[in-house]
Image: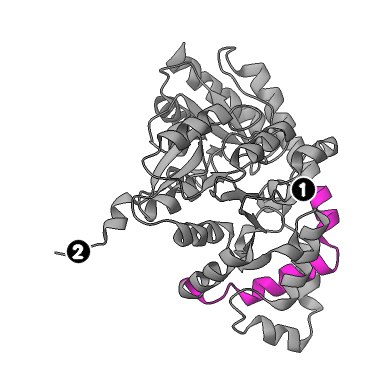
Amino acid sequence: MTRFSSATKNLRSSEIRDLMSLATKPGIISFAGGMPGNDLFPIKEIDTIYNTLTVAEKQVAMQYGPTNGLPALLESLGEFLDQKGLPVSENRLLITTGSLQAINILAKAFIDRNDTIIVENPTFIGALSAFKSYQADVISVPVGNDGMSIEHLEKAIHGAPKDPKFLYITPSFHNPAGILYSAEAKNNLITFMTGKEIPIIEDDAYSELFFHPEDADRLKPIKAINPKGIDVCYTGSFSKIIGPGLRLGWMLVPQHIYEKCELIKQSFDACSPTFSQVLADKFLRTGAIYPYLDFIRTEYALRANAMFDALESHLPQYVEWVRPRGGFYIWLQLPEGADAAAILKIAIEKGAVFVTGKTFDPEGKKNNCMRISYCNTSPEMIRIGIPIIAEAIRNICG
């Protein structure tokens, strides 16, 4: 009999990945995937960048690179993050193969079997899967419209069987809840966490996708606030601001954490794709990223507004939701006891798909909620698909 490791017992197929096969079927309108619209990728800009590379630059792109990242990209990305107010000079930057690898590396650096960690509820399924693969004891804290409840966080820490190894949060356009932490919520969290010797992993894949420039204060990462007495490990990604096919992310972490993470990265894949790093460096260095960000913010806002209008027109009044101010997602809260899986079954039969709430619950239980995304669906399809979901909700909830 084949004998697998005990860690594999905690691995489960992501419901989102399973649903993506449905999304490719003719006639299915997908609100499931958190991926950019294919029609929005900067194809012309990338073509121009590639066609202007020298032979020497193309040779570099085809070769192995340093584990920590291509020096040119470390420089240009460092400047990009510095302009966002992040303390680049006081930390170390590590290029990773997608931001999920950054989260995975940090998980491996911190978690021993049965260690306690704290996450939000709901939380990003990719991070949750990574943490469980290292056999962590996951404790969750509910998030409200403005951020994490400090009262619940305090109870979670005091009630934990072990001192938590870290706190994982997604303050900017949360996946899946779509919320943006308020400046007050971030400051309260910093005050509470200071001196507790519990690192914060701040996952920031979406903050560039804001709809309202006046949210600048709320968009400031905790890492940019640079609190003393807390190790903040900041992760980001090129997936949403160029394209996920590049498979490039990063972490910005204190030196003593970086040293462990670079060694772990060596054991994972030696280096991230050099070809992608060359393209990403040029995209930053030429300034192409700034008009492109302006373009996709406008496009995603159009899709989001189409979904807001459709939800307001068609959803029953008992469904609660908050308009996100950026990002990709809207979180629908159904009446207590409602079963999103039953709603999904009906919606699929009628031609629309979304992700049920229990996918994002660390305990896999709470299912009276659902995530719908507008990022990969045109306004026209949104106007057709949302009434299908609304009808399915009524069929189950009345």
- The image shows residue 72, relative to residue 180, as above or below, that is below
User: Which segment did they paint magenta?
Assistant: 268-295
Q: Which mark is residue 387?
A: none
Name the one closer to the observer, 47 or 273.
273
Q: Which mark is residue 296?
A: 1
Residue 113: quarter of image = bottom left
Report x, y in % for residue 98: 58, 61
- Badge 2 is on which residue? 3
Q: Residue at x 18, y 65 (%)?
A: 2
Report x, y in % for residue 141: 50, 33
Name the one closer to the observer, 250 or 340.
250
Can residue 374 be seen here? The reply is: no
How many marks on residues?
A: 2
Q: Residue at x 80, y 53 (%)?
A: 85
Task: Determine whether, in the image, residue 230 is placed left or right of residue 10.
Answer: right
Which of marks 1 and 2 precedes in the sequence?
Answer: 2
Amino acid type at mark 1: Ile
Can residue 71 be seen here? The reply is: yes
Q: Report the residue that reaches farthest toward the front.
A: 195
